[in-house]
Amino acid sequence: MIRAELARATIATPEAMHRFGVGLASHLRAGDLLVLAGPLGAGKTALTQGIGAGLEVTSAVTSPTFVIARTHQREAGQPDLVHVDAYRLGSPFELDDLDIDFENSIVVVEWGQGFFDPADQPLLEIAISRDETGESEVRELAATGFGERWAQSAWPVESWLQ
């Protein structure tokens, strides 16, 4: 299996996390699966909101706290963004009950670590860590691609954060 470290970045503010998501959106296409990992308040939803802005979805991307999955539509012919909160799911098997169109959508799964096997399907894992004391907004982000889809990606991360 191909494993590619695609980006490491220090993200100083929630706005910068949003900008990172906007930049990342330009590299996404139908069939992409993103798994976001990190503690509460790490910036997973801010990142997803940036992705939604970059994809120009037609509805507001909010924390999926009260729903397990929400589909955000785009212009006709463009793949929808599906935002999933796996936090309340008991097992990966419960994802099947959600009827997510993985093949024709861009799927972002918060709390999805351990729910997908990179050997079975390509995915982009984004791990976000933060100061455990909560005194700093600075986040460390690491993006790792699994599968051939991500082997040839080159991201201008620094320009995304400006």
Image: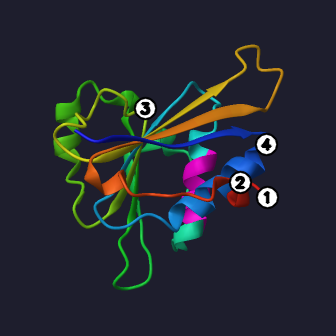
Magenta-span inclusion, residue 129: no
For badge 3, the amino acid type reads Trp
Label for residue 158?
2
Query: What residue is rendered at 36% in x and 53% in y?
Result: 150
Is residue 62 in view?
Answer: no
Query: Nearer the N terminus, badge 2 or badge 4?
Result: 4
Q: CA distance from mark 2 to mark 1?
A: 7 Å
Marks 2, 1: nearer the viewer: 2
Marks 4, 3: nearer the viewer: 4
Q: Are marks 1 and 3 in contact (CB under 8 Å)?
A: no
Q: Label 3: which residue?
A: 111
Q: Residues within 10 Å of mark 2 (few under 14, many from 20)?
A: few
Image: 39 above or below 46: above
Q: Residues within 10 Å of mark 1 (few under 14, many from 20)?
A: few
Q: Are marks 2 and 1 in contact (CB under 8 Å)?
A: yes
Q: Label 4: which residue?
A: 13
**Residue stretch rendered in magenta on the structure:** 46-53
* Count of numbered tags: 4
Q: Label 1: which residue?
A: 162
Marks 4, 1: nearer the viewer: 1
For badge 1, the amino acid type reads Gln
Query: What residue is rendered at 74% in x and 45% in y?
Result: 14
Name the foreground residue: 86 vs 116. Answer: 116
